[in-house]
């Protein structure tokens, strides 16, 4: 079974750095890009960026550029998303997601369960 | 950045009725458009990609149409499990700056 299993909920102080992990199983980790999506409470979906696990290359959304780092550890089939200089507006559920359908481009057919991160003093 | 605008924000529909959701792109995205369903407390689920191709396991009552800047998701006969929020997403750019619409909530009338 194809699965993306994310790390658990976190509470962070303003100014801190968060790190969320996404463990892949059921497919070859390096076959597909891994993306990260933010969803603030009661709000919509916002794409943050991606990593190519095979080559380590990353692309970030302009909104998060400079604060986000996405990486991949192929030895343990796990992707990571770090977000620094946290502020209250970063309180959200963070999803990892990937697209395994060749004809579907960057449409995401596989999603993690989401990780809730709360930023509060 | 390509801005995706969905309408209406909320759609009130009775079970068994048809629901029509719209998504507009600020510039052409060709057919590089996906639709997702998100139920409360769950991750989004891919319904449609390529503007009109149903993803694996998606019931035939879901259909997508459009190209360029205007897209539609139609649910032909709403079932109880279809009451949810629906998002469109464009994936036309490379390097990608993927963008989602703000969502349409389909609620029970």
Image: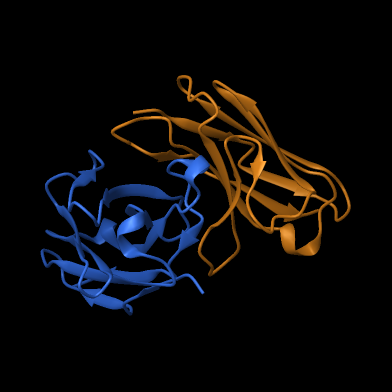
Q: So how many labels did they put on this image?
A: 0
Position of residue A93 relative to residue B51, above or below, is below
What's the colour scheme? Answer: by chain
Q: Residue at x 71, y 45 (%)?
A: B11
Depth order, front residue of B27/A54: A54
Position of residue A8 relative to residue B70, above or below, is below
Position of residue B76 relative to residue A19, above or below, is above
Image coordinates of residue B1 in percent, x first then y, are 33, 28
Image coordinates of residue A23 in percent, x first then y, are 33, 73
Q: Quadrant of residue A29?
A: bottom left
Res. A119 visible in picture:
no
Of all chains in the rendering, the one displayed in orange is B
Q: Is residue A26 left or right of residue A70?
A: right
Q: Residue at x 55, y 22 (%)?
A: B69
Q: Is residue B10 left or right of residue A78?
A: right
Of all chains in the rendering, the one displayed in blue is A
Q: Quadrant of residue B39?
A: bottom right
Residue placed furthest toward the bottom: A8
Depth order, front residue of A119/A18: A18
Res. B27 visible in picture:
yes
Image coordinates of residue B35 in percent, x first then y, are 58, 44
Image coordinates of residue A101 in percent, x first then y, are 50, 49
């Amino acid at each position: 079974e194809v699965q993306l299993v994310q790390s658990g909920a976190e509470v962070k102080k303003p100014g801190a750095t968060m790190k969320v992990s996404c463990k892949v199983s059921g497919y070859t980790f390096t076959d597909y890009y891994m993306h990260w999506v933010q969803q603030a409470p009661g709000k919509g979906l916002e794409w943050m960026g991606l990593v190519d696990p095979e080559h380590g290359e990353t692309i970030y959304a302009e909104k998060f550029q400079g604060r986000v780092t996405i990486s991949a550890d192929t030895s343990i089939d796990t992707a990571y998303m770090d977000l620094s200089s946290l502020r209250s507006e970063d309180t959200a559920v963070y999803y990892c997601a990937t697209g395994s359908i060749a004809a579907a481009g960057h449409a995401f057919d596989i999603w993690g369960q989401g990780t809730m991160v709360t930023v509060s003093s | 950045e390509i801005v995706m605008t969905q309408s209406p924000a909320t759609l009130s529909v009775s079970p068994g009725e048809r629901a029509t959701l719209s998504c507009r792109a600020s510039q052409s995205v060709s057919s590089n458009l996906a639709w997702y369903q998100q139920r409360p407390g769950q991750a989004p689920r891919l319904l449609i990609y390529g503007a009109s191709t149903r993803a694996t396991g998606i019931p035939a009552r879901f259909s997508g149409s459009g190209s360029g800047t205007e897209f539609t998701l139609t649910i032909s006969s709403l079932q109880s499990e279809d009451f949810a929020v629906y998002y469109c997403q464009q994936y036309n750019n490379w390097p990608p700056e993927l963008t989602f619409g703000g969502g349409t909530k389909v609620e029970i009338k």
